[in-house]
Amino acid sequence: MNARRSGRQVPESGPVVRPYALIAGRTRPSGQAIDLIASVCAVRGASAPDFDCEPEHLRLLRMCRVPASVADLAAGLDLPLGVVRVLIADLRDHGLVTVTGPATAGLSDGRILKEVADALRRL
Amino acid sequence: MPYADSDPAAALAATSAAPFAIKILIAGGFGVGKTTLVGSVSEVRPLRTEEDLSEPGSGVDALDGVERKTTTTVAMDFGRITINDDLVVYLFGTPGQKRFWFMWDELAYGALGAVVMADTRRLADCFPSIDYFERAGMPFVVAVNCFDDARRYPLPTMRAALNLTDDIPLLLCDARQRSSSRDVLVALVEHALARLSAGQQVTPAR
């Protein structure tokens, strides 16, 4: 018996287009894992997308003309992280963006940690 | 070609390498001041993650009438401090309840460390976070957010109540104050640095 017929309140169903509809129900990005703070950058001089892309792909592409982190892109697009990762992987598959890092080696570099501490002190 | 050379952003993309990114987690119970702390030192934005409803959440998340709902939206606080062109610090305020641990494993990967926030009125709320970071072998500090109407206790009393060893920094803070939140972050980075000097592992394995 569905919720409406049973007289229960139909819960708020969220956005009209569910985020995962944008990415055709895919929940895992293709290829190598994409870290939350990996840097995404549009490939300069790449041709326009030649695949069946969504407006969000194009927005993403514009947003990462300067390198941007995955978290920044997701917050900027106001889409769930999982969705944004799939969109980024699509662009990567078509050679339109590069995804790099994060470089975790710096965490074992005392000079970098010192630089961070000093910079935070100046906040 | 979509990006002409006259486009300043495109020109910048060609010259600027990705900055080095540092990730810091802000953990603790519901309402302990994570959003306030992230917001006092950086511009805070919500970051949505849509996650599978995990087994531990059943019985907690009311699913009456939405039995077919298999994902839930979890919002994290997300802040960024740009130190310079080459160095950026990202702050992630993470839900502290045990049922969100599935998110933590990813968040913790490659993180410099964590700030566990505590409220003396609900001290136990921060225990799961402390457990998690102890187990992960990740550097963390405990910051007691001094709410105006909360009772103050001496630090040694709180350290005993939290069952914290002497090597874990414990400090008082007022998350509303930028300088106070900044001091907490500095304490964490210094703690990570001290551990590094002592030859302890900083980055937990995934």
Image (cartoon, coloured by chain):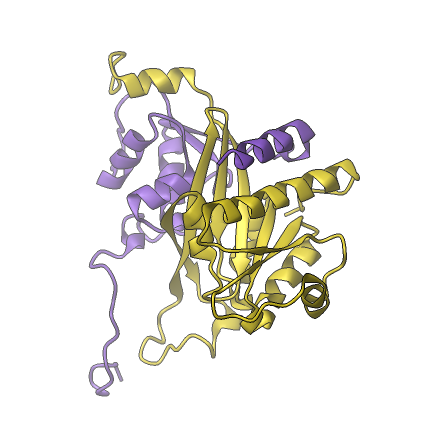
- Compared with A111, B129 (above or below) is below
Q: Residue furthest right?
A: B198
Considering depth in this image, is A56 or A66 the residue closer to the camera? A66
Answer with left or right where residue B137 lies relative to residue B147.
Answer: right
Q: Quadrant of residue A106?
A: top right
| Coordinates of residue B190 in the picture (x, y in percent) | 66, 40
What's the colour of chain B in the image? Answer: yellow
Q: Residue at x 27, y 48 (%)?
A: A22
Answer with left or right where residue A62 lies relative to residue B102.
Answer: left
Q: Residue at x 50, y 45 (%)?
A: B179
| Coordinates of residue A73 in the picture (x, y in percent) | 36, 39
Answer whether residue A46 is visible to the viewer in this image: no
Q: Residue at x 58, y 32 (%)?
A: A118
Q: Residue furthest top?
A: B5
| Coordinates of residue B21 in the picture (x, y in percent) | 52, 34
If the image is split into quadrants, where does the N terminus of chain A sit? bottom left
Q: Residue furthest bottom?
A: A6
Q: Quadrant of residue B3?
A: top left
- Compared with B129, A123 (above or below) is above
Answer with left or right where residue B29 lies relative to residue B199.
Answer: left
Count of numbered circles on the image: 0
| Coordinates of residue A120 in the picture (x, y in percent) | 53, 36
Chain drawn purple in the picture: A
